[in-house]
Structures are given as structure tokens and as C-alpha cells.
Image: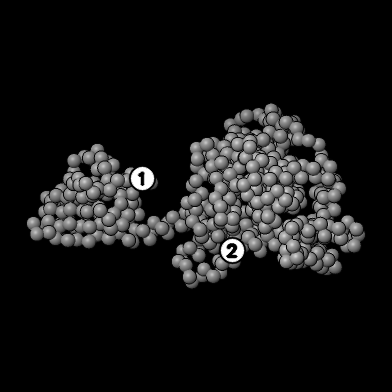
């Protein structure tokens, strides 16, 4: 695996390096913002981005995907930090909330690693496309709303008119450079050119505008990013009471779930964009390792970042080198490049993210209205709405999958067909078509009439499938009804496993065995 880091399979060295530098600039403001959400020092979020980016880019299952500190994780862990600090004040332990955070992130990493080892990452392939569209649209809206904070004061009011107009103009200039510079040349990523151009305007005094340093000063009282190398932060002072175990364990499970869902959904999105296929289980394992190391060395954890990943892809980053360069460049910024990064205008970074929003949002959503089944459009709206209103990506995806599954179950239940055919010997054959499962067994049972059927009845399963134990129970029940009516029911073309299950339940059903019987397994739903 080590040699894969130096083997160039996708993209090229120049594009990956320049794209990595571009991404590193875009990582700074979001890592700082998410640190404030989590209630920790910005350096904690920055080091999280370094660990997540370096480990997942090196060993993950999706070259070109960027991981770092994210808002979804920050929102979840903020409660742990707050409760930990409160308990620490009661016990006289300083920064106990940070130790709670580190323990939570480390445990979340272990859970994610187990998901990868057990190869459960493949289940993301079961997510319907409408859920994917709603997920992407919700994230695009969240990214858009987050950028408005750049144009507001600390108390949430809009900036004064002239200042607001100046920042809006710089954001539009950034977007114009990103859009039109590639028409001149693609040798350098247009996003990097836009950030450098607008940054030079601020640095040289051509325009006076809000910068990264201003954000840092507002949040921490310090105007620079300067920091030392991370230290080992083993949470040794935590009093492991039942309440603490429940808090840390429950939050860690949520962090692991949210992180994997967001990462695997982002992986699938990049797969579609690049027409390649990543390795979901490998990504789960890498995310787990990255989060464990992040917590061990004082980070807040994270997952894949859809915005920065799209910036990387748009800038030409396709290989692992792009993510590695981004992590290493961010390390340099933290240690020695703080003054330079501090001069980047926030308007330029907002302009970059506005372009990401435009590229992320599935504009085809509006074209689907009236052209796809209504339930699919409803799923898109539900997932988008839950993502935006609840800021909970895991809940949004779960809601979309549940709605899609219920709609599929309802639709499938309507397509069970029983076609009767009377034979010359006086018996009747019912040819069953469709899937017999918990959603369709009621309709199946109601279409059979033991009271009026002949003495000999056969149900032919050649064009049907028995899907779960509910259907086997229904077969036993309907056989009992025929027996009480003094009639015999036989089943034809059942799989060997279904025959075994029926015989185990009793000798009520007569099952015919033929050479063309199907071979499939019963699924316990």
C-alpha cells in the first residue's frame, strides 16, 4: 500500500499540486468557523483538517476527495464539549470538555474502522438517486447560507452599505475570475488565481476589506494562526461514570454515522462526476484511522468535505497527491504561514464557495417535476428540507431512504397477481406473479378462496419470489384454511430453502419438487 502513494494513476503531478494548494486555502476559514461551532480553539479544527486530509488522501478509497473538520461533526460534538466543561467546573478539572471531545472522536474512529473491516460501506450503494439529489441540494443550500455570515457583523446584522457593497463586489470579481480565466489558460487552477488576485488587492492596500485575520481576532482575540506541533492528548482525567460512558458512547456513534454517511455520499458524488469508482469500505477504514489519530493528538474529528472536494476536482485534482499537498500546505500555514493566510479577504473565499454552490446544486431537480414519479420528487424535497432545517445529514438520508422504501413496498404490494387456471382433472392452478413479502401477503391471502375453490389447489411460484418469513407464515396460514375446508393445497416451484422452512414448520403443506425449481434464499426482513 505504501507504494501506491507514489504511483500516479489519476491526474498529473502539476494539476494535483496546484489543486492541493488551492484547497489548502479553502480549508482555513471553514476549519476556523467549525471550531467556533464546536466551542474549541481554531487550532484544534485546523489540526483536525491536517490529520483527516493526510490520512484519508494517503490511504482512503477515493483519490481526489478531501476530508477535514466539518460543520456536521462540529454540531454533534459541541454538546460533549459543553457538558464536559460544566462537569469539569464542578470537579475542579480544567478543560475536561476537551478530553470528552478527544475520547468521543477516538471512539468514533474505532467504530468507523469496524464498519470498514466488516465491509458495511457497500450499503451506501442502496441509497436511491432521489435521496442523493436531495442530499446534494441540501448541502449546497447550507454552504450558501453559511457564506452570508461573511457579510454580517458579530451580532448578525448586515454590514454597513459601503462595506457590504465592497465585499459583494470582491466576491463577484472572484466568481468572474473563476468562470472566465479558464478561457485564457488551464495551466493554473482558476480558483487559485482568483484567491491570489483578490488577496493581492487587499495586501497592497488597493482595497480595505475583512480578512481571515479579522475573523480570528473576533473569535479568539488573536490575529494570527501561529501554533506549535500537536501534542499527545490522551483523555486521562475523565471520570468514567455510567453517565459519561452513555454521553461519550452515544455521541461517538452519532459522529461515526454522520461522518460515514457524508463521506460515502460525497464519494458516490465524485464517482459520478469523474466516471470512476471509489472503494467505500477502504474509505470507512481510513476515516476511522484518521479520526482516531485526530482525537489522540488534540483534534475535533471530521469527515469528507463536499465543498473542498468539488474545488479539488474542478481545479484538476484527481490523485492522492492533491489531498496530501493540501494537508502539508495547511500544516505550513499553521506553523509559519499565518501572516500570509491572514491577509486573504473573506469575500474571496465566499466567492469561491458561491461557485461551489452553483456547481453542487442539482439544477435538474426542477426539470424532474412532472417527469418522474411524484414520490421521487417528494423524496428530494424531504431530504433537502431535513438537511437544511435540521442540519443533520444522517437523519436526512435516513428519512429519504425510509420514504423511498415505504413507497417501494406500497408499489410492490400492488403488483402481486394470482391468475387461476382450471385443469381437466378438476383441480385449479394459481400462477403467482410478483414478490411475496410482508407488504403483499395480505392481498395474496385475500385473493384465495378456500370455500369456493376445488378440492385440489396448486399455487405455482415459477414467476414469483418468496422474500421473507412473513410470506412463509402466510403460506402456513392459508394452507390451514384449506385444510379446515377439507381441501388440499400444494405448492409448486419453490426454492429448496423455502421447502425446508415449510417442512420445519409442520406437514401442513404439500410441496412439489421439480428440476426447474428456483434457487434463492429467504431474507429475514
Secondary structure at badge 1 equals loop
Asked if one can make out residue 36 in the rendered structure from this viewpoint, the answer is no
- Outermost residue toward the left in this view: 425
Q: Residue drawn at (54%, 45%), measured in percent from left and top? A: 280
Q: Residues within 10 Å of mark 1 (few under 14, many from 20)?
A: few
Front in this rendered view, residue 209 or 263: 263
In the displayed structure, 330 sits above or below 418; it is above
Residue at horizontal 15 percent and vertical 57 percent from the top: 428
Residue lying at 23% horizontally and 49% vertically, measured from the top left: 516
Looking at the image, residue 377 sits to the left or right of residue 483; the answer is: right
Question: Where residue 174 sits: x, y (%)?
Answer: 77, 63
Colour setup of the view = one colour
Relative horizontal placement of residue 378, taking residue 188 as reference (left or right) = left
Residue furthest out toward the bottom? 370
The first of marks 1 and 2 along the sequence is 2
Residue 101 is situated, as x and y percent measured from the top left of the image, at 67, 38
Query: Splitting the image into 4 quarters, where does residue 100 fall?
Result: top right
Look at the picture and state if 123 lies above or below 117: below
- Could you tell me which residue is drawn at 69 percent across and 30 percent down? 234
Q: How many marks?
A: 2
Inter-mark Cα distance, 1 to 2:
35 Å
Q: Is residue 268 left or right of residue 324?
A: left
Observer-nearest residue: 359 or 83? 359
**Circle 2 residue:** 362
Determine the secondary structure under disc 2. Answer: loop
Q: Position of residue 85 (x, y in %)?
A: 71, 38
Instruction: Quadrant for residue 274, please give it.
Output: bottom right
Q: Is residue 260 visible?
A: yes
Q: Are there few (<14), some (14-19), or many (20+) residues within 10 Å of tag 2?
A: some
The circle drawn on residue 523 is: 1
Amino acid at each position: 500500500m505504501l507504494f501506491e502513494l507514489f504511483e500516479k494513476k489519476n491526474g498529473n503531478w502539476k494539476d494535483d499540486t496546484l489543486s492541493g494548494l488551492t484547497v489548502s486555502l479553502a480549508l482555513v476559514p471553514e476549519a476556523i468557523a467549525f471550531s467556533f461551532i464546536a466551542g474549541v480553539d481554531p487550532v484544534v479544527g485546523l489540526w483536525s483538517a491536517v490529520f483527516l486530509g493526510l490520512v484519508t488522501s494517503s490511504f482512503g478509497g477515493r483519490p481526489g476527495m478531501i476530508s477535514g473538520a466539518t460543520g456536521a461533526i462540529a454540531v454533534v460534538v459541541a454538546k460533549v464539549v459543553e457538558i464536559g466543561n460544566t462537569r469539569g467546573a464542578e470537579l475542579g478539572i480544567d478543560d475536561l470538555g476537551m478530553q470528552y471531545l478527544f475520547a468521543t472522536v477516538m471512539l468514533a474512529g474505532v467504530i468507523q474502522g469496524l464498519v470498514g473491516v466488516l465491509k458495511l460501506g457497500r450499503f451506501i450503494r442502496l441509497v436511491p438517486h432521489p435521496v442523493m439529489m436531495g442530499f446534494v441540494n441540501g448541502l449546497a443550500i447550507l454552504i450558501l447560507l453559511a457564506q452570508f455570515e461573511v457579510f454580517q457583523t458579530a451580532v448578525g446584522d448586515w454590514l454597513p452599505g459601503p462595506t457590504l457593497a465592497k465585499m459583494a463586489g470582491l466576491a463577484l470579481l472572484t466568481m468572474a475570475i473563476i468562470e472566465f480565466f479558464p478561457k485564457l489558460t488551464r495551466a493554473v487552477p482558476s480558483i487559485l488565481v482568483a484567491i491570489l488576485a483578490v488577496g493581492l488587492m487587499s495586501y497592497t492596500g488597493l482595497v480595505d476589506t475583512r480578512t481571515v485575520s479579522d475573523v480570528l481576532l473576533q473569535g479568539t482575540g488573536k490575529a494570527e494562526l501561529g501554533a506549535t506541533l500537536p501534542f499527545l492528548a490522551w483523555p486521562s482525567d475523565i471520570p468514567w461514570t455510567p453517565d459519561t460512558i452513555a454521553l461519550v458512547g452515544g455521541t461517538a456513534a452519532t459522529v461515526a454515522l454522520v461522518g460515514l454517511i457524508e463521506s460515502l455520499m460525497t464519494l458516490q458524488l465524485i464517482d459520478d462526476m469523474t466516471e470512476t469508482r471509489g472503494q467505500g469500505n477502504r474509505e470507512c477504514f481510513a476515516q476511522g484511522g484518521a479520526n482516531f489519530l485526530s482525537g489522540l493528538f488534540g483534534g475535533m474529528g471530521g469527515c469528507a468535505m463536499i465543498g473542498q472536494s468539488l474545488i479539488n476536482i474542478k481545479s484538476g485534482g484527481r490523485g492522492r497527491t492533491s489531498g496530501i499537498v493540501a494537508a502539508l500546505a495547511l500544516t505550513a500555514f499553521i506553523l509559519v504561514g499565518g501572516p500570509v493566510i491572514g491577509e486573504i479577504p473573506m469575500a474571496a473565499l465566499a466567492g469561491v464557495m458561491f461557485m461551489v454552490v452553483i456547481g453542487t446544486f442539482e439544477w435538474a431537480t426542477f426539470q424532474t417535476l412532472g417527469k418522474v414519479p411524484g414520490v421521487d420528487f417528494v423524496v428530494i424535497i424531504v431530504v433537502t428540507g431535513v438537511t437544511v432545517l435540521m442540519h443533520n445529514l444522517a437523519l436526512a438520508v435516513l428519512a429519504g431512504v425510509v420514504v423511498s422504501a415505504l413507497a417501494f413496498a406500497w408499489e410492490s404490494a400492488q403488483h402481486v397477481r394470482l391468475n387461476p387456471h382450471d385443469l381437466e382433472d378438476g383441480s385449479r392452478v394459481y400462477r403467482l406473479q410478483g414478490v411475496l413479502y410482508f407488504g403483499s401477503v395480505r392481498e395474496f391471502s385475500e385473493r384465495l378462496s378456500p370455500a369456493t375453490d376445488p378440492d385440489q389447489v396448486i399455487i405455482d411460484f415459477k414467476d414469483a419470489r418468496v422474500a421473507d418469513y412473513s410470506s412463509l407464515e402466510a403460506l402456513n396460514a392459508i394452507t390451514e384454511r384449506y385444510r379446515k375446508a377439507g381441501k388440499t393445497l400444494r405448492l409448486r416451484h419453490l426454492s429448496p430453502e423455502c421447502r425446508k422452512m415449510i417442512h420445519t414448520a409442520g406437514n401442513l403443506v404439500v410441496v412439489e419438487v421439480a428440476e426447474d425449481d428456483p434457487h434463492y434464499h429467504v431474507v429475514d426482513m
